[in-house]
Every structure is written in structure tokens, then in C-alpha cells.
Amino acid sequence: MQIAGVKINENKRVKYYYYDNLNLKKNLTVIVDTEVGLQFARVYSIIDKELDESQIEKGKIVRITTKKDYVRYLANLKDAKTALKKCRELVKKLKLNMYIIDAEYTFTRNQLIYHFIADDRVDFRQLAKDLGSFYKTRIELRQIGIRDKAKEIGGVGLCGRRLCCSLFLNEFDSVSINMAKNQSLSLNPSKINGACSRLLCCLKYENENYSKCRQNLPNVGSIIDNDKVKGKVVSVDVLNSKYKVLTDKNTIVEVSVDNADKE
């Protein structure tokens, strides 16, 4: 069994599936047997190393697509747009406090999946019933959070690259404002919030290293009193392991952590 990374939706992250006896190459389109049924996907990478089982999705790549498959896939995309419009009309008619983000058919159209956001729990049973009787297929309505919305839709972050959540993150880690403070970042929301209006996921990436670097550094505002320097800490350079002290003589002295330890 071999492993390939595929994208079922160009805006979503790469998912890894097993395959067997298929001559797969990057950018080939394939049919994948997923938890929700058969899906049309594009090969993003061929994996030549072992992956942890937790990284591999349930199901497998069953075959390379044909021209007929591609025509069917395009028809599904077109019909999904119509289904999205229809669902939004029904939501308005039923006066439900929810916003439908997208609609997606599985390849064989045995299931029509909607994603929506809402401030509270929504009783959408009548909506699902109306959609089911109209489209004659299984309807699934999935409520997602604001961060999940960014993951589903995709976009570009402050760094100029695609959003991490839609590119490679499998789960959302807990991110706190203390991580921004720990890295001496400006607490301006436009600088530390992502496209989802929540704290940037990437604040988590280097937080552990910053915490280690800070272990021997004083906090801004603390008082230093030793043989070489006496005064108040006015700034800290975490990455270079240095800090500046405003002395009693109203002068600024830069202190290295290594030198301070020797003192």
C-alpha cells in the first residue's frame, strides 16, 4: 500500500489516503472513497516516507478518473451552486438565524452537505426535510465555528501565504493573548488577528522557544540591583538574550544575560 496526498476541494487542506496498484502522479485526478462516500480529488503529492496512522484518513483512493468522471464532477459543482441558492432561500423563508456558507455534493450525489455558521443552536429539522424532499438525497447540515469558516473558504494571511488552517492544520490549537505578549508583539487586533477575527494560529508555533529564551530574562518594569548595574528594566530583546536598564544616573545600559549570569 502506498500513500498520496490529495485535495478534495482546492480551498481545503491536503488529506492523505492509501492506494494500491495505481500509477499516480502529481495533478492527476482520482476518485477517493471517503467517510461520506466517493469524492473527486486531485493528487497533490506522492508520499515516499512513513506517516503516523493518525495522519492518514479512513478510506482509500480507488481509481484514476475518466473524462466521463470529470464531466460529472463539473455538473456536481454547477448543481451545488444552485442547491446553495435554494437553501439560502429556504432559510430566509423559515426565518432561521443561520448563514449557509457552501454546498457540496458527493461524487455519486448520495449526499448533499451544507456548512453553516450561527450564533446559537438552530432547529433546522424542517429545513433538512424540505431540502431532502426537493433534491431526493440525504441532506447533512454541519454547523461550524468562525475559525472553521476560514478553513472551509480559505484565503491569504497577513504573511502573504495561504491560511494555515486551510493548508495543513488538522486541528485548531488553543491560542491565548499571553502568547502575543510573550513574543513582545503589538496587541493591535489588526496585527495579531487572522482572517477569522480570532488570534493568529501561528502565535502558537514559536511560543515554546520564546518561553525558553525568556527564562533568564527579567520582566519590563522590574528593578535590577547588582555590582555592575542598578536601575529599572525598560526593554527586553528576547531573541538576542539582552535587556536595557535605565540607571539612577538616567543612562541606558544594555545587559547580556550571559554577562549578567557571570556578575
Image: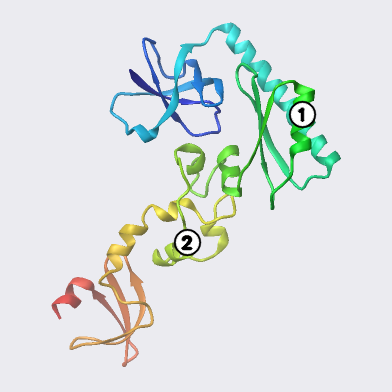
The circle on residue 131 is 1
Q: Which residue is mark 2?
A: 176
Residue 83 lies left or right of residue 64; in this view the side is right
Above-or-below relation of 44 to 161? above
Where is 99 relative to 53, above or below?
A: below
Instruction: Please provide percent x and percent y for residue 56.
Output: 39, 30
Asked which quadrant contains residue 108, the reply is top right
Real-space Cα separation, disc 1 to disc 2, in angstroms: 40 Å
- Please name the amino acid that badge 2 sits on: Ser
Q: Is 103 left, or right, of 197 in this rendering?
A: right
The total number of labels drawn is 2
- Drawn side of residue 135 relative to residue 25, left or right: right
| Disc marking residue 168 | none
Question: Tag 2 or tag 1, which sits nearer the N-term?
Answer: 1
Position above or below: 25 against 211: above
Circle 2 packing at 10 Å, graded few (<14), some (14-19), many (20+), is: some
Name the residue nearer the viewer: 20 or 8: 20
In this view, the residue in front, 49 or 222, is 49
Residue 235 image point, x, y percent: 37, 75
Measuring 59% from the left and 54% from the top, which residue is drawn there?
197
1 or 2: mark nearer the eye: 1
**Residue 171 drawn at (x, y percent):** 46, 44
Pointers 1 and 2 in contact (C-beta within 8 Å): no
Viewport quadrant of the N terminus: top left
Q: Secondary structure at mark 1?
A: helix
**Disc 2, SS:** loop
CA neighbours of label 1 inside 10 A, class few (<14), some (14 to 19), many (20+): many
Amino acid residing under circle 1: Leu
| Residue 154 shows in this picture | no
Would residue 108 be visible to someone looking at this image?
yes
Give the residue drawn at x 28%, y 29%: 50
Q: Residue at x 17, y 76 (%)?
A: 261
